[in-house]
Every structure is written in C-alpha cells, then in structure tokens.
C-alpha cells in the first residue's frame, strides 16, 4: 500500500480539525478539533518514520501524546472555570475583549 | 589725492542725530541748537574742501578717503570709501548749505512742537545719509546713503504719524522708493556680474569692454532707481502725499536735495549711459513725460504745498531730461538742480511761513491778498517765482533755457519732440506758478475770521532771504564763462562739440519767453480780480477733474498693484491653510482613519482569529509555492 | 546482549534550566505542604533565589560551547546563553512585579462575584501558585532557544505556553475578561502549535531527521521532496510567528495583553518575545539557512505588514494595555528585519533589540500597574490625563519608556532600531528599512499622544491616583529605566559582549 | 590652547547648570532664573574666549576631539568646528543669555515650575552646541533628534493657545524628516562598510564613491529633513503654529538657532557628502527657495497676528539663505552663513519686543495695538529698529548678508536673483504695515496704560541692537572667519565662481 495514502489521510484529518476549529462554537468541541489536528500530525510522523526507516518520528508521536495530555489538563481547567462563571461553553459568548 | 576730513562731513550730523535720539527728553532744551551746529559744521568742512579744490588744477581736484574694508568675499570687494570730486562738492555744498538754513528756519517753525528734538535728530540723520549718498565711492556705498535718505524721509513725512493719513503717506513713500531701490540693487548685481566690480572707478574703467546689452540693462535699472527716488514717472505718485511732512522737510528733502538724487545717480553714471544710447533715450523720455505730467497736475492743485510738489516733480523732469541728453546736458541738469535747490527751497519756506501765519491753512482758496500782511515772504517768494518761470536774469532762466536748447539740439525727431515738450512745460509752469502767486498774495482776502496773518519771525525769514539771493544770482554765476560746465568737465567728459545747432540759443530764449508770457497772461486773466470760490467748483471739465486726481496716478496704482497684491495675499493665505497645510493634515487623517478601520478586524470572536491564522497558513503555503515556482 | 551506553548529559551546561525546573518543583511542594501563612514569602524567596542561581550559572558557562550538551537535542552556544541570560533577567524583574499580589485573584476557580471569592479576598489570603507556574514557563523559555531538534522545540514550546495560558486567567479584577483572555490564548495557542507540529512532521519527512543541523544539511544536499520542505517551513513558521505575534497571526495579542493581569502581561510580553525570537532565529539561521530563497520573500512581506499594521492600529487604541500590545506587534515586525538580515550583524542586532525592548516593555507595564483607582488598575487612556501633574516622576519614567519604543536617540530603543535596520539594509532588504522608518514615524504619533495626555492635559478628578509602589515594584521599574537610559548613552559594553559572544553552532 | 577641550567644556557647562538648577527648591523661581542667567552668561563668555582661539586661515576642523563611543558601529564622540560651525555656535551661546534675561517671567504661564523651564532651556543649549560641533554624522543625528524633546516640552508646557497641538505637530513633522535622514545615514554606514570600514566621520564619508542614483536618494533623505527644519516651502506649515504657541524666548531659540541646523546641514552634509546629487537637485531647490521668499513674504503681509507674521517673515528669510547656499558661489555661501547669524539676532529682536508688547496688552493681534509710539516710545522705537533690520536696511547687518546672497546668486542664476529681489519690496510692506497699525495713528483704546520697557528689558535688547548695528558697518570679523571655510568647501566640491562676463568675453 502506498505510503502517500497515509499522508493524505493525515492531511485530511488535519484539515477537518482546522475547519472544525473555525466553525464549531462549543469550546470543548473546538478543543477536540485541535486534538484531532495533533493526531493528524502524529499520523504523519509515524508514516514518515516508516518511510525514513528511523524511530525519531515514532518517538515524537509519544511526546506529542504526552503534551496533548497536558494540554487537556490545562485546557479543560480553563474551559470549566469560564463555564462556571458564564454558564455557557460557547466561544462566541466570550467576546468582551475586542477592537 | 586723499583727504582725511571727508568722513567728518558724515560723522558730524550722524553723531548729532545719534546723540539727540539717545539723549531723550534731557536734550529738549539744546537739541535743536546741536542739530543746527552739526549741519553747520558739515557746511564749514564742505567749504574748506571746496577752497582746497579751487587751489588745485582741474584734473587734481578729486579727493578720496578709504576708511576700511567693508565687505570682502571672494572677488566681491567693497571698501567703505569716500570720494569728493567736482560733482559731489556741488551737492555737498547744496545739502549742507540749504540744509543748515532749513535747520535754522525749523528752530522757529517747530518751536511749538513737543518733539522738536526728534525732528532735528531726523534732519541730521538725513543730512548724514544724503552726504554718504553723494560721497560714496562705489554704487554699494551710494546704496547705503540711498536707502538712508529714504528712511529719513519716511521718518520725517510720518513725523506727525498720529494722523493716519500722514502715516500712510510715509509708508507709501518708503514702498515707492523700495521699488526704485530694487532697480538699484539689480543694477549693482548686473555690474558685478559683468564687470566684476561695483566701485565708480572700476565700472568707469571697464565699462568700455562690456557689451552694450549689459550696459543698457544697468542703465535701465539705474533709471528705475532714479524714478523711485526722484518721483519720476511712473513712480511719482508718492511725492504729493509726502507733503504731509512738516514744511521744512518738504523744502529740504522733497524739493532741494533728496529728490534730486536720481539726477546725481544718472550724471554720476554718465560713463554707462554714454555707452548705452537706448538707456539714455529712455532717461530723456521719462524726463520729458514727467515734466509735463507734473506741470499739468500743478495747474489743478488748491493745496499750496501740493502745487509746489507737482512743480518740483516737473522741474526734476527737466533735470532728468537734461541728464538724458548726454554729455551736452549733464552740466545743465546739475545747474538746474542747484538753482532749483535755491528757488524751490525758498518758495517752500515761503509757503511754510504763510501757513505759519495762517495757522496751518494750506488751501490757497482761503488765502488771498496776503502780500501786504507778510511782505518779506511775498518778496522772497516772488523772486523764487520769477526764477522758476525763467524770467531773465533770474536763475531759472539760465538753467532751464539751456536744457530746452540742448533738447532741441539733440537733433531729428528726438530733438523736436523733447524740445517742444520742454517748451510747453515752460509755458504751463508759468501758468500754474502765476496762479499760485495770485491766489496766495494778491486779490481779495478769503481767509476765515479767526485767522490774523502776520509776518514770520526773523529766524524764519532770514533763510528765505538768503535763498532768494541764491535764486537771483546763482544762474548768472554758474553760466558766467561756462564756469559750472568747465568745473564738471573732468567728471562728465565732454564729447567733441556735436552736430550743427538746430536753433540759435537766442531763438530758444525768445520762444521760451513768449510762451512764458502767454502762460502768465492766461493765469492773470483767469484769476486776477475775479472772486475765487472758497470750495473748488465741481462743474468743471473732465480734464480738470482728472488733473485734480493727479492724472489718476493713484487710481491706476491702486487698480493695478494694490488690488492684485491684496488678491494674491488673500489667495495665498487660503492656499496655505487649506492646501499646503491641508495636505499635511490630510495625511495624518488618512493614517488615523485607516487605524480606526483596521481596528474593526479585531472582532473579539476567537473563531475569527483562528480564521486569520488558517488563512495566513494557507497564504504562506501558497506564497512559498509561488516563490519556488 | 548489546552493550548499554548511557546517554551523555553535561549537567553543568544544562544546569540553568535544571535549576529553574528544580525550583519549580520545590514551589509545587511548598504549595502542597507549607502553611498558608508563610507561603507567600517562602515562594517569593525560592523563586527569586532560583532565578538568581540560574543566572549565575548561565554567567558561569557563558564561554563554553558544545552542540552535545544533551545528546545533540540541546546546544549551548553564545547566542543561546545570551538569550537564557536575558530571559532570566527579565524573569527576575517580572517576578518583582508579580510579587505585588494586589493584581491576582485568590482562588482562580472561584466564580466571579461569588460568595466564595469575596470571602477569600477578605481573608487577605494570597495566590501563590503563580510562582511555580512562572518558573515552569521560564524553564520552557530557556529551553526554547537552545533546543536543536524539533522534538525538544515542541516540548519547550508547550512548556512555556501552558503555564502562561493559566497565568493569563488569574487577574483579581475584571475576572471575566481575564478568563476570556486565558481561553482565547489557550485555544489559539493550541491551534497554532498544531500547525507547528504538522510542519515539524513534514520537515522530518523531508530530512529524515529531526535535528536542525540535519535539516540544514539535507537542504544543502537538496535530496528529498521539496514539497515536504516547503509545507514544513510554512507550517513551522505559523507556530513561531504566532508566538511573536506577527500579522496575520497576531490577533490574540491585544486581547490577551489586555485581559491578563498586568504583571503577567509584562513578563509574557518581554520574555516570550525573547524566547520565541531566539528559537525563530536559530531555526532560520541554522535549519533553513540555505533555503532562504524560499522563505525570505514571505518573511519580508510579513515583516512589512506587521510593522505597518501594528503602528497604524495602535493609533486608534483607547486602552493603554491594548496600545502597548499593538506596539509590541509593530516591534515584532522590526525584529523580523533582523531575522531577514541572516547575518552575524543581524543576530547581534536582534539580541540587543530583544534585551532593550524587553526591559523597556517590562518597565512600561510595571508603570501601568501603578495607576489605579478604588476598583483597580486604570487602563483607559483618557483617565491618564494629567498624570504628569499628579506624579511627575512616574509620568517621566513612562514617557522615557515610550520614547525608547519610539526610538528617540539617547534611549536604548534608538540604538536597537539603528543596529537592526543597518543589519537589514546591509543585506539588501532596503524595502524593509524604508517601511520600518516610515512606520516608526507613524508609531511615534501614538507614543507622543500618550505623553501629551500625561503632561499637556489637565487632570480629571475621578479618583485616579498613582499608588505608592512596593519596594520590589519600584526596584524593577527603576532598574528598567536605568538600563533603558544607560543602553542609550553607553551601549558599547553590551554591544561588544554580544558581538563577541553571539554565535550559533551547529 | 589645544590642550583645552573647548567644545566639550562648552557643551558640558549648560548641562551642569541644569543639574544645579534641578537641585534648587521648586518654590524659589528667582534662584532658578539667576542660576540659568549666570550659566548662560558664563557659557557666552567661554564661547567668545574659544572664538578668539580660532585660527582663521586654517581650513581644517579645529578644537577637534575624538573618543570612541560605540566601536561596534565605528561611532565616535567626535567634535570640531570650521568657520561656519563656529559662527553658529557663537550665535547659540550669545542668544541664550539674552533669551533668559528677556523672558524673565515667561515661565510663569507654564504648566510647570520656572525651574523646569530653565532646566529645559539649559539642556537645549547643550544640544545646540553639540549639533553644530558634531563631526560624526551619527552624533549629529543624535543631537538633531534629541533636541526636539526639550523644545517639545518648552512649547507644550509653557506656550500659550493651542500649545500642545502645536508641539505635537512640530515634533511629528521634525521626527518624520529625521527618520528619513536616519534611513540615509544607515545607507551611508553600510556603504562606508563596503568601502573599507564602518565609519561616521564626516570627512571620510565625503570621500566615498557612491553611484549617482544612490546619491540622489540619500541626498533627498538628508535634504527633506533639513528642508523641514529650515523650513522651506512647502514643508513650513509647522512653524507658524509653533511660533504662535511658543513663548517668545522659545520662539527665538526655535527660529534663531534650531532652524539654522537645517541650513547648516545643507552645507555641511548635503553639499559635502553628495556633491553630485547636489548639482542634480540645485534647480529644483532654487525654485523652492525662491517660492519660499515670495510666498513667505505674501503670507506675512496677510497675517493678523504678530507672532505668525514674524514666523512667515522667517520663512521668507530662510528662502534667501537656501538660495544663497545652492547658488554655490563664495558670495552666496558667505552671505548665507552670515545671514544665519544676522537673522538670529533680527528675529530675536522682533520676537522679544513682540512678546513684550503681547504680554503687556494680553494679546498679540496687530489690530489690538495702535499709537504705541506715543504711549511707549522706547518699546516702539526698538520694534521699529528690529523691523528695519528685518527688511535689511543698508547699514544694518542683515543688509550685508542679504545683498551678498543676492549678488552671489545673480552671478550664476540671474533669474532666481531677480525674482528674489522682489522680496525686498514685499519686505518693506510686511514690516511697515504692522508698524503703521501698531505704532502710528491715534492711541488705540486699551493701550493707554501700557508701560514702557523696564531696565531689565533694555539691558536684554541692547546687545542685540549693538550687534546688528556694528556688523552692519563692520562685518569683517565674521566674514574673515567664514570665508576660508566657504572657499574650501566650494573648491573640494568642485565649484568655482563664474568670472565676470567681460573676462569670459576676453578669453
């Protein structure tokens, strides 16, 4: 099976994630989309690792997961606080700061 | 030859004026005396130098004095240097002599004025500047005196400047003079650019090598300067208003000396004009036009001083005409200048004395029959009158006839035109001067009840008498054996005696006399034993009205220069506000505007920010793609 | 069984980072075990102690250079050391500001206006988590410019970002705004780092290695799929340009700067820029050096847009913090000119500029923390009117910082501007220089407007006042002022030190 | 006497004065005034002492000092003066004490204490000396820009009317020009690096080989900055506002000294660094100069306010100076330099008296005055004198310089000179009209009570009048200092005076 296909899939995932960030309102969902993008990157890493025949890419993937995990911690904390104070998780409601 | 005393000629009056101005009220008691003394001292030095001159041979007479190096930049070298030659000495004596007399006269005339000290300070300032004008050994030094006298005249015309019209008159005089000065400074620039020097000696030496074009340019510019200072057409308009100044000022500055500076300038620059015929012709034409212009204006004036001013304008026209006739004319121009200095100064002082007796009434329609109340004034004025209309053997007869004669002898159309203009002028002169005399001194009295005319004090009539003597005798002295002509010969070198005379001198004199008699007669018929209306009749011919309005000179200037000037000014003020500064403000507004516009991109919605990033990323990829292709 | 070779780590060279991390861990411990009473002073002293110690260590190793400090994933070289030193110095000054707890909420989780919050405030307790968070961020910032492979870069990026996301949300007053700032910062930050990661993936795909020098070599060798390289460069740049706040990746800057507690803004604005530019410089100078034909035009365009946009929009701002945010965007544009120079001169200039700018920014925000009324800081420009009359000294300090931003001679800003523009011009980026000059003319307008407001307009009596700053705050502001002036008058020592030290080794 | 660091000393002194004033109590304005006066007087004396040490016929820079400042960029603290710079430094140090004494109470209307006012003035004096003394382009730029700050605060802090707006306009406009110049300076720096070593030394830079197109751009960078400073039409609009808002003393320093930096820079930098570009742009610049002369004069006539009027007369005068410079003849250059000096004093006289009139009457509108000659004779006559010197009456210093400029221009560009000569007629108008309105005529209601000049004011104005008079009759002391430098500048940039046409014809 052609390695390129894996890359296409990753690119597709990345695009879906990016578009999702732009179009979805719910902060959680937006955040999920970001995660999707990260995983798209991971897929690319692994694929390239296979292509190049060394393990750096795979290692990178692990790091990414860890980092993603950290992001979840921080991210959810922030989203939850703002939800508690606003009773809404819509990113469009948070628009006091502008201009 | 050098002399160490020339500088004191200028220094004395200069010191006088400086002292009087700085000393302030403290000097009120003796200020006038000091001023007169300074002027007198200058006169004495002048006499001394004159006697020295007489002692030397005709070529050795000129003396110089170099004070210090004034301006020296590259090849532009100007010394503060003085030169006294046969031409300047005439002026020195006229200025200091008449000047001193008028100082004396003013002591009495201004005795009631609180600012008499300042008046004398200005008079001294004028004497100093005028002497610098005639003594400077280069055009630039002359220029300093030239504007100096302008300043003095401005200060003296506006001496009573609390009266707005007087202040305006002063300003008008200064500005008109500045226009002339512009000509002078251009002349200096041209001569430096072409000849590499601005000293009289240098210019005289190199004038030969220069192109006629350049010399003509210089000549025309000098003529412009002369028209400004000597109130010649077309810059004559200021002289009439200048009569706002106290009468002694009119006598000294605006009759005897300053206004004749133009004649001096042209005579001094004879080496230029003789090499630039076109320029010379222009000079003559300007002279001719002005002498008629002034004469015509003179016929319509009721204000005695304005009438005399117009006559001055016309007489200087004669001088300019004479100077414009080249080597043949210079001497006579100067001669007329000197004689005119005597009789016109005398008549002005006479007018002043009349005003003094009539508590400053100047309207001749309110005079009449004053002859028996102020006999001395009448006598001196009368002598001056005879002189100016050119009745033999009075001074004016000699000088004026000579000019008319030379004008005819210029030959051809030129000769005929100029000559007949001069003749006609003589006739009109006779008319309006007679009118002045009749209206003022003879006929029935028309003055107001409160006025009780009386003869002026000795301090005033003494100078008048002396000047009257001058106006009687000077002409004869100057012409006797061509004394003045030969005297001036080294300065204005005579060209070999020119083409056959068109008219014999005798013929000219007769012609002139006939016309003069006609003029006088006309005036007598018109004004003697006829009651003169107290206000000028308004149902008069259009010509009279035009003449009364000074042949519309002011209306012309106003329409052409003042109106346009004010228009330009107003336009430019608007331009500066709206366009030039508007552009600056516009840029600022543009920046600010775009700032507020771009500010709206910051919507506050995180998704739109993400959109920016996404677009940016895609843009980067696309761009980098394009770049590498 | 194959012989095991232990990884070689030169601890002395990594020490600065390790010290900071250690300090951070200790800080966490303190949070966990120390009593509320002593926490604040304890945390503060630990934090400052750590930073000073790390700074000393950095100074100690300033002349040692090796690419193999940590198996080639982190390097110690002149440039790196300078950046680390600068970051630490800024951090110290920043902590001085943070120490003024007035600005911070006590329980970040508490709902604004809730009973819980009011109680906590009345109890006079203090929030001390901020100290370890700061230290973690500092560690990340220190790692960012010295890391030489994409893995370390990514980790360092996240390590400096995550704490900042949280710190942005800690403001005591205007909680909603603060939280919103945190949210925006977080979402966009994560978004951009996803791009960074994706770009990294493609670079790895292109070069077959994650080490910058390896990538550089691959570019030189020009074997491999260029498409991967280009996508890699583009996406990696997105991540980095986001951090430095270059247009069009700037949008977070004004909102976060305004929303975050001012001391945090100060610290973040100054330190993050240094770290991000450090990494950016290293990546472009070491990694992409030979691909500059591809990226230079893009960066040029971005630099130009950034300068102009920042300067122009700043004019329209009514809020002092937002205005400073836009000015920082403009300065990011100027700094990109240094990147474009791609020369030793460019590197030196950028480092000097970063230090000068960082110090001035810290000082400026420090002053902002001082202007308050009963309800907290005043950031509305109109209420700054007549500050010069109320407290001439503070106003003068602020004016000096603004003049430094505007690049008026005799301030550090001018030297920085000159050096960076001359470097850019030297390498043929005339256009950037011209635009830079013009936009600094525009920028001058709004700096001066603030000065006019402070000095030439009469104060309005609305309770706005300048509080008497705590000793530490005063110390940090005055230090910043002194440095700004000193670097304007006698920049030679620092410039010499930089030019003799600053190099990238591969 | 080369062992004395004249220029540095001269520059430091006012700064020390400022520091001293800074330590005086805020309440005691008098002490601050006295300290400032003492300092400036002392500096003036020192300046004159320095001038006596100047070797006239030596065309090299003198009192040279050079210390490495920022070696990384080859920047030195390098100072030194030629004839022109010396004259301008003299101008600055002579005007400073006059301004302090004349504007004794100027600070009272300000936002801040008199103390601040005099600190700013003294700092400004240091910068004025520095900007003329600097022989390192970078150092020059530093002073050129830093100078703006004290002036900005002087206008905005102590001025009247729309002072802050005027101050901002002034600062931004100048800053804009300065930044253009910075771009050119950077380019010079880079080019010098390519041609053997980064440097900012003026002399070295003048030997660079620069392609003509580059030269043109760099020239423009410098020239626009100087044209804004000078100010030349159409970059002048900041001046009237600034002069209108600033206190008389500030205006004197602004028009009298600061603006000279522009014309000084045209000679020192535009000409010597970019001789070819100078040749290229000369026609354009001459046109601008002539426009400034006429335009400034007409606008002066159109003004209703004394301060704005004087500002516009200065624009006209700066037109003359620029014209003289770009005529590239010895007369033109010497004239222009002398003009800079004289204009400093005649403007000072005009502004100070106008300021006194305004402060007495509480208005600077011309229409609010009338018949002053009868109320306050001394003040009126001093104003008259100042006016005469402004319209370049022969016998006063300004005449010598103005005529030199005109004659120097005529020898190469007759048309420009002729048009410029119209300026002297307009000058008569813009001086005499306000004089008639304010000094002559009946006494305007509201002017009866005005008091005449007091002793302090007389003492302040006396030296100005003296200088104007003496230099009018005996300008040699200055000309002898200026001429060698001018000749040297022109010869190294390859300009020779056109010979009189008769000699041309001879050849």
Image (tube, rainbow, N blue to C red):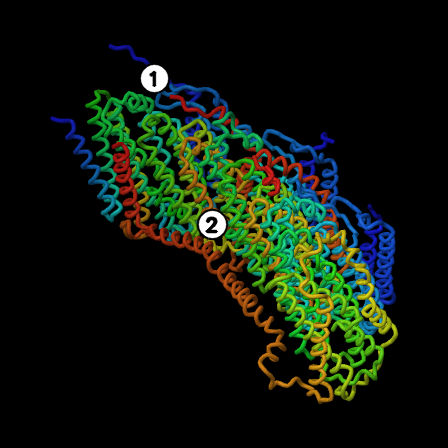
Quarter holding residue B538: bottom right
- In percent of width and height, residue D410 lies at 59, 47
Q: Depth check: D487 or D47 in front?
A: D487
Q: Which mark is residue C7?
A: 1
Q: Depth check: A47 or B80 in front?
A: B80
Q: Are marks 1 and 2 in contact (CB under 8 Å)?
A: no
Location of the C terminus of chain B by quadrant is top left
- In percent of width and height, residue C68 lies at 38, 19
Direction from residue D488 to residue B79 in the image, left or right:
right
- In percent of width and height, residue D489 lies at 60, 36
* Sequence-earlier tag: 1 or 2: 1
Q: Is residue D282 above or below residue B102?
A: above
Query: Which residue position holds label 2?
Result: C446
Element assignment for label 2: helix
Q: Depth check: C79 or D209 in front?
A: D209
- In percent of width and height, residue B356 lies at 80, 77
Same subunit, labels 1 and 2: the answer reads yes
């Amino acid at each position: 099976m052609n390695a390129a296909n894996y890359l296409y899939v990753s690119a597709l995932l990345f695009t879906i994630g990016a578009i999702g960030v732009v179009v979805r309102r719910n902060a959680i969902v937006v955040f999920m989309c970001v995660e999707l993008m990260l995983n798209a990157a991971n897929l690319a890493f692994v694929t390239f690792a296979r292509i190049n025949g060394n393990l750096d890419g795979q290692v990178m993937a692990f790091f990414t997961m860890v980092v993603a995990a950290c992001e979840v911690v921080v991210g959810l904390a922030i989203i939850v606080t703002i939800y508690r104070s606003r009773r809404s998780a819509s990113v469009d409601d948070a628009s006091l700061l502008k201009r | 030859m050098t002399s160490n005393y020339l500088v004191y000629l200028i220094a004395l009056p200069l010191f006088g004026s400086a002292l009087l101005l700085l000393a302030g009220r403290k000097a009120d008691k003796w200020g006038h005396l000091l001023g007169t003394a300074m002027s007198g001292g200058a006169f004495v030095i002048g006499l001394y130098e004159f006697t020295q001159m007489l002692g030397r041979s005709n070529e050795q007479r000129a003396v110089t004095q170099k004070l210090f190096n004034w301006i020296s930049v590259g090849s532009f070298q100007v010394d503060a240097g003085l030169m006294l030659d046969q031409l300047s000495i005439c002026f020195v004596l006229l200025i200091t002599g008449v000047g001193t007399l008028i100082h004396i006269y003013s002591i009495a005339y201004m005795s009631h004025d609180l600012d008499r000290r300042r008046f004398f300070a200005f008079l001294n300032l004028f004497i100093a500047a005028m002497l610098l004008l005639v003594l400077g050994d280069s055009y630039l030094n002359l220029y300093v005196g030239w504007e100096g006298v302008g300043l003095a005249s401005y200060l003296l015309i506006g001496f009573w400047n609390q009266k707005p019209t007087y202040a305006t008159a002063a300003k008008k005089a200064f500005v008109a003079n500045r226009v002339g000065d512009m000509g002078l400074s251009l002349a200096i620039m041209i001569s430096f650019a072409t000849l590499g020097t601005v000293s009289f000696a240098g210019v005289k030496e190199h004038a030969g090598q220069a192109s006629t074009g350049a010399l003509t340019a210089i000549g025309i510019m000098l003529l412009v300067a002369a028209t400004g200072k000597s109130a010649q057409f077309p810059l004559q308009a200021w002289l009439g208003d200048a009569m706002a100044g106290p009468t002694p000022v009119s006598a000294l500055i605006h009759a005897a000396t300053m206004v004749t500076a133009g004649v001096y300038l042209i005579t001094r620059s004879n080496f230029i004009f003789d090499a630039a015929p076109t320029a010379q012709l222009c000079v003559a034409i300007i002279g001719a036009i002005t002498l008629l212009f002034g004469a015509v204006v003179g016929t319509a004036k009721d204000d005695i001083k304005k009438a005399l001013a117009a006559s001055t304008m016309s007489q200087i026209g004669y001088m300019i005409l004479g100077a414009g006739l080249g080597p043949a004319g210079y001497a006579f121009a100067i001669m007329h200048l000197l004689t005119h200095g005597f009789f016109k100064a005398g008549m002005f002082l006479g007018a002043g004395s009349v005003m003094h007796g009539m508590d400053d009434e100047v309207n001749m329609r309110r005079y009449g029959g004053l002859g028996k109340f102020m006999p001395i004034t009448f006598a001196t004025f009368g002598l001056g009158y005879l002189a100016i209309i050119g009745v033999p053997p009075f001074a004016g007869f000699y000088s004026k006839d000579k000019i008319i004669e030379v004008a005819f002898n210029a030959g051809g159309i030129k000769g005929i035109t100029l000559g007949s203009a001069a003749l006609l002028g003589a006739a009109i002169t006779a008319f309006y001067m007679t009118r002045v005399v009749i209206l003022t001194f003879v006929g029935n009295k028309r003055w107001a009840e409160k006025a009780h005319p009386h003869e002026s004090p000795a301090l005033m009539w003494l100078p008048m008498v002396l000047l009257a003597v001058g106006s009687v005798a000077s002409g004869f002295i100057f012409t006797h054996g061509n004394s003045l002509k030969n005297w001036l010969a080294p300065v204005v070198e005579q060209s070999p005696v020119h083409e056959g005379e068109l008219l014999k001198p005798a013929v000219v004199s007769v012609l002139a006399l006939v016309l003069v008699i006609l003029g006088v007669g006309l005036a007598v018929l018109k004004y003697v034993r006829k009651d003169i209306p107290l206000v000028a009749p308004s149902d008069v011919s259009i010509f009279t009205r035009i003449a009364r309005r000074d042949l519309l000179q002011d209306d012309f200037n106003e329409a052409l220069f003042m109106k346009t000037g004010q228009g330009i000014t107003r336009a430019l003020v608007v331009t500066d506000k709206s366009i030039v500064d508007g552009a600056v403000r516009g840029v600022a507004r543009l920046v600010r505007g775009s700032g507020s516009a771009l500010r709206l991109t910051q919507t506050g919605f995180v998704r739109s920010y993400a959109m920016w990033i996404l677009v940016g990323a895609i843009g980067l990829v696309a761009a980098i793609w394009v770049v590498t292709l | 069984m194959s012989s095991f070779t232990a990884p070689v780590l030169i601890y002395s060279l990594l020490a600065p980072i390790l010290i900071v991390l250690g300090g951070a861990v200790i800080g966490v411990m303190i949070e966990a075990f120390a009593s509320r009473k002593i926490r604040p002073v304890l945390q503060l002293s630990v934090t400052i102690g750590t930073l000073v110690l790390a700074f000393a260590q950095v100074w100690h190793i300033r002349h040692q250079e090796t690419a193999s400090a940590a198996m080639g994933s982190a390097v110690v070289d002149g440039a790196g050391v300078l950046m680390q030193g600068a970051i630490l110095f800024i951090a110290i000054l920043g902590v001085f500001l943070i120490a003024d707890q007035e600005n911070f909420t006590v329980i970040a989780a508490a709902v604004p206006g809730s009973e819980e919050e009011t109680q906590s405030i009345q109890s006079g307790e203090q929030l001390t988590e901020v100290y370890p968070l700061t230290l973690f961020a500092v560690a990340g910032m220190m790692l960012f410019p010295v890391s030489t492979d994409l893995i370390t870069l990514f980790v360092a990026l996240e390590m400096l970002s995550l704490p900042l996301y949280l710190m942005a949300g800690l403001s005591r007053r205007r909680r909603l705004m603060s939280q919103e700032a945190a949210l925006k910062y977080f979402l966009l930050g994560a978004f951009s780092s996803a791009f960074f990661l994706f770009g990294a993936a493609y670079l790895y795909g292109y070069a077959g290695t994650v080490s910058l020098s390896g990538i550089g070599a691959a570019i030189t060798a020009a074997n491999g799929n260029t498409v991967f390289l280009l996508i890699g460069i583009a996406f990696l740049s997105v991540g980095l340009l986001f951090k430095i706040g270059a247009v069009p990746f700037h949008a977070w800057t004004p909102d976060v700067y305004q929303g975050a507690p001012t001391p945090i803004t100060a610290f973040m604005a100054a330190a993050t820029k240094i770290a991000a530019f450090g990494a950016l410089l290293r990546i472009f100078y070491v990694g992409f050096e030979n691909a500059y034909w591809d990226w230079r035009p893009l960066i040029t365009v971005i630099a130009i847009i950034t300068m102009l946009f920042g300067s122009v929009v700043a004019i329209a701002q009514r809020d002092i913090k937002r205005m400073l945010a836009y000015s920082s965007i403009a300065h990011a544009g100027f700094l990109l000119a240094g990147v474009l120079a791609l020369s030793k001169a460019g590197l030196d200039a950028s480092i000097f500029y970063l230090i000068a700018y960082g110090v001035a920014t810290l000082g400026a925000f420090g002053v902002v923390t001082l202007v308050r009324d009963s309800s907290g800081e005043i950031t509305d420009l109109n209420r700054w009117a007549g500050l010069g009359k109320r407290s001439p000294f503070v106003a003068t300090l602020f004016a000096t910082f603004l003049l430094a931003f505007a690049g008026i001679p005799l301030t550090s800003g001018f030297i920085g501007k000159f050096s960076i523009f001359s470097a850019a011009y030297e390498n043929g980026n005339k256009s950037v220089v011209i635009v830079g000059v013009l936009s600094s003319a525009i920028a001058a307008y709004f700096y001066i407007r603030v000065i006019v407001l402070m000095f030439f307009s009469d104060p309005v009596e609305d309770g706005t006042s300048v509080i008497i700053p705590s000793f530490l705050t005063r110390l940090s502001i005055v230090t910043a002022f002194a440095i700004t002036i000193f670097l304007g008058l006698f920049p030679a020592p620092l410039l010499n030190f930089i030019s003799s030290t600053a190099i990238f080794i591969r | 006497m080369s062992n004395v660091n004249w220029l540095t000393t001269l520059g430091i002194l006012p700064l020390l004065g400022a520091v001293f004033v800074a330590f005086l109590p805020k309440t005691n304005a008098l002490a601050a005034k006295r300290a400032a006066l003492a300092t400036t007087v002392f500096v003036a004396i020192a300046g004159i002492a320095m001038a006596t040490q100047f070797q006239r016929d030596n065309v090299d820079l003198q009192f040279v000092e050079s210390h490495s400042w920022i070696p990384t960029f080859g920047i030195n603290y390098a100072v030194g003066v030629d004839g022109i710079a010396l004259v301008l430094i003299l101008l600055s140090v002579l005007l400073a004490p006059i301004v302090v004494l004349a504007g004794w109470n100027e600070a009272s209307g300000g936002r801040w204490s008199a103390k601040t006012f005099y600190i700013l003035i003294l700092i400004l004096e240091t910068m004025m000396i520095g900007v003329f003394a600097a022989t390192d382009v970078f150092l020059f730029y530093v002073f050129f820009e830093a100078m703006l700050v004290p002036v900005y605060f002087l206008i905005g802090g102590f001025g009247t009317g729309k002072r802050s707006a005027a101050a901002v306009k002034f600062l931004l406009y100048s800053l804009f020009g300065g930044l253009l110049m910075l771009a050119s300076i950077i380019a010079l720096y880079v080019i010098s690096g390519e041609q053997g070593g980064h440097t900012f030394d003026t002399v070295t830079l003048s030997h660079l080989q620069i392609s003509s197109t580059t030269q043109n751009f760099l020239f423009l960078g410098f020239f626009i900055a100087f044209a804004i400073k000078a100010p030349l039409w159409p970059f002048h609009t900041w001046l009237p506002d600034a002069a209108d808002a600033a206190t008389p003393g500030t205006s004197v320093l602004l028009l009298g000294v600061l603006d000279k930096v522009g014309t000084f820079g045209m000679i020192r930098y535009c000409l010597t660094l970019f001789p070819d570009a100078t040749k290229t742009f000369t026609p354009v610049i001459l046109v601008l100069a002539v426009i400034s002369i006429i335009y400034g004069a007409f606008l002066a006539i159109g003004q209703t306010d004394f301060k704005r009027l004087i500002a516009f007369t200065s624009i006209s005068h700066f037109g003359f100076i620029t014209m003289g410079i770009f005529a590239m003849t010895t007369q033109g250059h010497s004239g222009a330099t002398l003009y800079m000096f004289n204009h400093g004093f005649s403007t000072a006289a005009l502004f100070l008296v106008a300021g006194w009139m305004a402060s007495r009457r509480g208005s600077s509108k011309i229409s609010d005055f009338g018949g002053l000659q009868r109320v306050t004779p001394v003040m009126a006559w001093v104003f008259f004198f100042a006016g005469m010197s402004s319209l370049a009456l022969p016998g006063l210093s300004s005449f010598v310089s103005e005529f030199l400029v005109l004659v120097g221009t005529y020898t190469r560009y007759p048309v420009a000179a002729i048009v410029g000569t119209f300026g002297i007629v307009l000058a008569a108008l813009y001086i005499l009209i306000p004089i008639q309105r304010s000094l002559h005529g009946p006494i305007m209601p509201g002017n009866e009570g005005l008091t005449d000049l007091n002793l302090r004011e007389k003492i302040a104005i006396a030296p100005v009048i003296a200088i104007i008079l003496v230099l009018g009759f005996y300008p040699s002391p200055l000309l002898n200092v200026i001429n060698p430098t001018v000749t040297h500048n022109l010869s190294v940039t390859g300009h020779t005076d056109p010979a009189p046409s008769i000699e041309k014809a001879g050849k």
